[in-house]
Amino acid sequence: MNTANRKPLPGTSLHYFDARSAVDAIAPGSYDKLPYTSKVLAENLVRRAEPEKLDSYLKQLIGRKRDLDFPWFPARVVCHDILGQTALVDLAGLRDAIAMKGGDPAKVNPVVPVQLIVDHSLAVEYGGYDKDAFAKNRAVEDRRNEDRFHFIEWTKKAFDNVDVIPAGNGIMHQINLERMSPVIHNKDGVAFPDTLVGTDSHTPHVDALGVIAIGVGGLEAENVMLGRASWMRLPDIVGVELSGRPQPGITATDVVLALTEFLRKEKVVGAYLEFYGAGAAALTLGDRATISNMAPEYGATAAMFFIDQQTLEYLRLTGRDDAQIKLVETYAKHTGLWADALTNAEYERVLTFDLSTVVRNMAGPSNPHKRLPTSALAERGIAGKWEEIPGQMPDGAVIIAAITSCTNTSNPRNVIAAGLLARNANARGLTRKPWVKSSLAPGSKAVQLYLEEAKLLPELEQLGFGIVAFACTTCNGMSGALDPRIQQEVIDRDLYATAVLSGNRNFDGRIHPYAKQAFLASPPLVIAYAIAGTIRFDIEKDALGHDKDGKPILLKDLWPTDAEIDAIVARSVKPEHFRKVYEPMFTFKASTGKGSPLYDWRPQSTYIRRPPYWDKEGQGALAARERTLKAMRPLAVLGDNITTDHLSPSNAILGDSAAGEYLKKMGLPEEDYNSYATHRGDHLTAQRATFANPTLLNEMAVVDGKVKKGSLARLEPEGQIVRMWEAIETYMDRGQPLIVIAGADYGQGSSRDWAAKGVRLAGVEAIVAEGFERIHRTNLIGMGVLPLEFKPGQNRTTFGIDGTETYDVVGKLMPRADLTLVIHRRNGEKVEVPVTCRLDTAEEVSIYEAGGVLQRFAQDFLSSTRAA
């Protein structure tokens, strides 16, 4: 820690690091012109960077230069149990590797505080119409995940700096927003801004508090855990001026879906956004959080709001200590992080958006940025006529209606609006359709307390929206099994069945295997669709029912007024609710690393298995084999918008899948196959999820002249169409190096390290695409897979790629270097294609050359201990 710029913080007994004086010493008067993000990054550098390099780094920030790397040192790492657990499995495997080389495994610990929240493991097996759903779902979760939870309990004792919040307590982002983030830290007598990385794409949720928090893959999180800087180049910082106010009846969900469409069109992928203006100032913190949460959907890395009076009021509402709230105010005002001090911030690009233009919206049917105004359902071909046949589900049947996800359940206005709509529907005798699996899964236990205070929880329960969990559930694809009769009817009639949820992702195949498409909607709209029962229903125009006089009941008759919502929020959402939930939850002591340093692996476990990344032999050990980038065969040739759900799905494992067949051999009953996500601590199960999505379109899998949908590959040189896993197994046995060819936006969607681990263990050495999603690109590098980018205007069709070729990569690996992709066609022709190496920094080159994050750390650790 540097001391030259350490000064007393006025009005406190603390010190702080004066970024203003450091910046202005280089360029007088420039600090006040910096965006919020740059000010926070400057403080991080002043406090943590090597003194001899500090001026150079600060000049990059001041001059807005993006051609050099600089270090960022996040204060925390926040994990959910899927990626957090797999990261800790990797560290446990790393300890084994260190021990085998004669090192001390107990010295392998997270250096940065790690908070792990178990929130991704629960499936909604029992819907919200079962009064015991919460207890039953938790019991199933504990039974299915006993191996995983055993390992997580071991980590609490074995590692320093790991805190665990067990299952049943909420969603990581909502807990982070409502309690874990202090906004301003007070540590060792020093005040400094909270910053963090999280193992989930929606980590920017807490950006709403003015906290730089970005989503990273598990591998990048491991790098930060182990004390390494997160190296970056100055991001594109875009100002987004919000004007106006939302019209009456417009929810934060409507706003964020409109913004998602707008920002996608404005191409903000990878940017740090800073929302400001009169419109931003008037938004509640809950509304801001809904906007920040959806950053991955519009492609931004971060979605920042400034610290202001709304921030302080939210901290007070959620039960933070008065002293902490005062510290946030004092620090922000003194260091130029208070909203009023940002009026002179200069942006290289400014976008403007008028909140008053927002209408009631949904998103779908397949992408969160595909806005769907509810007034345009018929013209978009969503709503239309359908035949009502007694005893049958209609076309477009809504088989899942879920109020889920921290995106919306962290916003009291959205939740209260849903409760009021339920109350109004009950008063008119409306009910959900019997084929709709309905659920309410808040991200915080405080939601239950304020719904009870408002006397709205019974109203929700009456319509089938009782609380089924405090976890991610349906938003993460953990929607649970359908009633067997409903599932069979969907299969027998090949029914177009759908899901409506208040989540943030609706990619095909994500929400449920039998929901062909899914739509995002606000919590009150989710309830309306549960009553309607079909997506073919015109939600603004069709009658949801009729009153006792035969008069049609329309959505507008049920929709609560803003004044009523605000009055109930003001009356029913109280600081004591949050204190009652969080004070017991955070009375734990940090782990001390006093347990056994080596984990006793359970050989029959299908959840936790020692990773193979340091093995030199054995099936699946390709990550340890030398990469040659020569004679690679394509495993898949893919189009645009390949998501991490295509690469490594997270939803339920079906019995006829490769993973399902493996679990059957391991003796698991099918009802306990659980989800792909929960098995990611066992590489033998997780490998079988690679490209296992049934909606995959591998352009090599051509049958009768058409690409066949499914988890399929074409084995070469035989030319035989086989299941993807069969091709992977065959190529592994042959030791055949592989390549993947893809289109634009490769790897978008949820942060998922197994989307990189799976292809690497299959033997994929390089991926050539038109563009990569940020987190997935870093995960590929972290696993030793080389990301290459076609030059603008060129793609797989430009070169007539059909998958019969073999490939070499030629050239010196350097950040953003031009390399040559050599294509060897079956007829002997050779084509040389220029491509860009997407190792963007010297640090990324170093990690790739070592074979990945873990191999790099092992090498450095052993070198340092030997030198000592």
Image: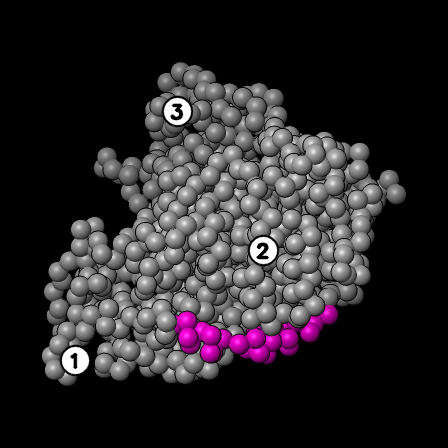
- Is residue 584 within the magenta segment? yes
Q: What is the distance, in whole Å, between disc 1 and disc 2 at their CAs?
A: 48 Å
Indicate the position of residue 196 as horizontal and vertical percent values.
63, 52
User: Where is mark 3, residue-wise?
Assistant: 794
> Foreground residue, 472 or 197?
197
> Foreground residue, 384 or 48?
48
- Helix, strand, or loop for circle 2? loop
Where 364 falls versus 849 (above or below)?
below
**If you read the primary sequence from the N terminus, does the residue marked by circle 3 or circle 1 appear first?**
1
- Is residue 494 within the magenta segment? no
> Foreground residue, 469 or 178?
178
Q: Which residues are magenta?
A: 565-589
Determine the main secondary structure of the stretch shown in magenta. helix
Q: Residues within 10 Å of mark 3 (few under 14, many from 20)?
A: some
Question: Would you say the residues marked 1 and 2 are in contact, meaning their CB atoms lie under 8 Å apart?
Answer: no
Report the amino acid beneath label 2.
Ile
User: Where is mark 1, residue-wise?
Assistant: 547
Whether residue 417 can be seen here? yes
Question: Would you say the residues marked 2 and 3 are in contact, meaning their CB atoms lie under 8 Å apart?
Answer: no
Indicate the position of residue 249 as horizontal and vertical percent values.
32, 64
User: Where is mark 2, residue-wise?
Assistant: 307
Q: Residues within 10 Å of mark 2 (few under 14, many from 20)?
A: many
Number of callouts in the render? Answer: 3
Q: Nearer the viewer, mark 2 or mark 3?
A: 2
Indicate the position of residue 212 as horizontal and vertical percent values.
59, 50
**If you read the primary sequence from the N terminus, does the residue marked by circle 1 or circle 2 appear first?**
2
